[in-house]
Image (tube, rainbow, N blue to C red):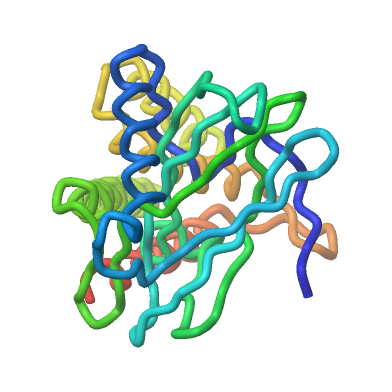
Amino acid sequence: MQRDFPRRICPPLCRGVYRSEREMRTLASMLLFVICAAAADQPAEPVTSTITHDPFGAATVRVHNGASATLTAFNFIYTLHRDPNGPAYGASMGYYDALTDPQLAQPVPPGQEITLPFRIGGNGMYAKVAVAASVFADGTSYGEKATVQKILDRRNYMLVSLNKTIGELTQAAKAGERRELIVQQFQMALGQEMAAGLDQDLDACIQTVRGLVIGTLRSSRAADGSVIPTDTQLQSLIATLKARRELLKK
């Protein structure tokens, strides 16, 4: 069943918004290259996207896996236009990765398709979308080498973020630290890391992991209203992050 997701100009799985005119032209050119690859006598793309615009211009994006292997990740380029046939006013690269975002993204079997969990554009802006690179469960990939590498780099960044956070939570559990203190420490660290001018994709991975920890610890009560012991929450978080780490190590 297709879900009706809310419209968002900047979707949560999208990272890498390029603001300079030069970078925007580069991404727009990449989008044009991907769209015109078939016409240029290139091999058929194994992963393709289709978009449906609503009356306000917001696009629902569906991605089809036409390969013989399960699709685990892809990045895509989208541009925003005031007129569907007019020039691009913004260009961005987004990611969908079942290994770095297992709560939001799932592997796509051969012949299947998924609807991205957000909408792009809206408020009079129309989107054009194309898959730029893909990575499959059997270790194969498709796309320009540098674009595929961005997916692999992001996985390495997520592994670094998970290792760092698991270590911090393990130490906090051993020290018997209070929930409020741990939340405060993670918030401070997150603020410092965001201000440190890190690689944008690394920063996104750090925010994802630290945000999960902060959000979980703030939910100090179970569904029945009882207080969840801090140690129980920490052990659950550590187990969750270790499971995500194992996905990346396969």
Asked whether residue 243 appears in the rendered view, the answer is: no
Q: Is residue 193 above or below residue 105?
A: above
What residue do we see at 59% from left, 50% from top?
A: 216
- Residue 60: x, y in percent? 69, 51
Residue 45, located in which quarter of the rendered image?
bottom left
238 or 66: nearer the eye?
Answer: 66
- Residue 236: x, y in percent? 50, 65
What residue do we see at 20% from left, 76% from top?
A: 139
Q: Is residue 149 above or below residue 69?
A: above
185 or 102: nearer the eye?
Answer: 102
What residue do we see at 49% from left, 39% from top?
A: 78
- Residue 147: x, y in percent? 23, 48
89 or 42: nearer the eye?
Answer: 42
Asked whether residue 172 appears in the rendered view, the answer is: yes
Name the quadrant of the N terminus: bottom right
What residue do we see at 46% from left, 75% from top?
A: 65
Residue 208, located in which quarter of the rendered image?
top left
Name the quadrant of the C terminus: bottom left
